[in-house]
C-alpha cells in the first residue's frame, strides 16, 4: 500500500516536472497534479488497452511507434478531463507524454 502511495506521489511530481519543462503544458498546483496522476493511471488501466487493441494493425505497420501517438492523445484527454491541466496542441502533448513515460519508467522500480 505504501509503494502505491509513493508511485502516486512520484507520478504527480513527474506531472509537475513535465508541466515545468515542456512548453504548452501548464499544471496549476500539486493537488491538480495528484488528481491528474490518478486519472492518468485509470486511463492507462481501462482505456489504453482497448485503443492499443483497436489500432493493432497500425501498430504493426509502424513497428509500435503509433503507441506514442496514442499516449499523446490520452494525455490530451486527461487534460480535457482534469480542470487545471492545460495542453496547447498535439506536439506539446506528444513531448509531455513521452517525457512522462520516461519518468514513469523510473517509478516502476519503486
Image (spheres, helix red, strand yellow):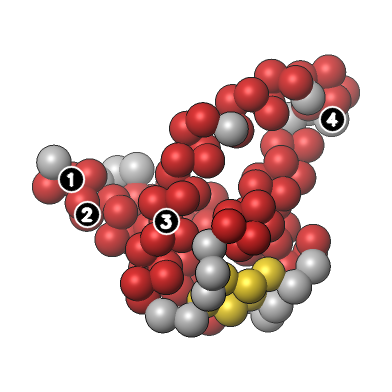
Indicate the quadrant containing the N terminus: top left, top right, bottom left or bottom right. Answer: top left
Choose between 105 and 94: the one closer to the eye: 94
Residue 107 drawn above or below residue 32: above
Query: Which dot marks residue 3?
Result: 1
Instruction: Say whether marks 1 and 2 touch (CB < 8 Å).
Output: yes
Mark 4 — residue? 62
Q: Can residue 14 be seen in this view?
A: no
Image coordinates for residue 87, horizontal then vertical, percent: 68, 69
Residue at image point 42% right, 56% down: 37
Choose between 20 and 26: the one closer to the eye: 26
Residue 103 drawn above or below residue 62: below
Instruction: Say whether marks 1 and 4 touch (CB < 8 Å).
Output: no
Instruction: Say whether marks 4 and 2 touch (CB < 8 Å).
Output: no
Query: Which dot marks residue 37?
Result: 3
Q: In this view, does 106 lie to the left or right of 54?
A: left
Q: In this view, does 65 lie to the left or right of 100?
A: right
Identify the image quadrant of residue 24: bottom right
Mark nearer the N terminus (4 vs 2): 2
Q: In this view, does 91 lie to the left or right of 81?
A: right
Image coordinates for residue 61, horizontal then vertical, percent: 87, 23
Residue 110 drawn above or below residue 91: above
Mark nearer the N terminus (3 vs 1): 1
The nearer-to-camera label among 3 and 1 is: 3
Q: Is residue 30 left or right of residue 53?
A: left
Report, in whole angstroms, how far the alpha carbon at label 4 lies from the one at label 3: 28 Å
Image coordinates for residue 110, horizontal then vertical, percent: 24, 46
Instruction: Say whether marks 4 and 3 touch (CB < 8 Å).
Output: no
Amino acid at each position: 500500500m505504501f509503494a502505491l502511495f509513493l508511485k502516486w506521489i512520484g507520478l504527480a511530481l513527474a506531472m509537475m516536472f513535465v508541466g515545468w519543462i515542456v512548453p504548452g503544458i501548464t499544471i496549476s498546483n500539486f493537488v491538480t497534479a495528484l488528481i491528474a496522476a490518478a486519472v492518468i493511471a485509470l486511463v492507462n488501466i481501462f482505456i489504453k488497452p482497448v485503443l492499443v487493441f483497436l489500432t493493432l494493425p497500425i501498430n504493426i505497420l509502424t513497428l509500435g511507434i503509433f503507441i506514442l501517438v496514442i499516449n499523446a492523445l490520452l494525455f490530451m484527454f486527461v487534460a480535457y478531463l482534469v480542470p487545471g491541466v492545460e495542453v496547447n496542441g498535439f506536439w506539446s502533448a506528444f513531448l509531455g507524454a513521452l517525457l512522462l513515460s520516461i519518468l514513469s519508467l523510473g517509478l516502476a522500480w519503486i
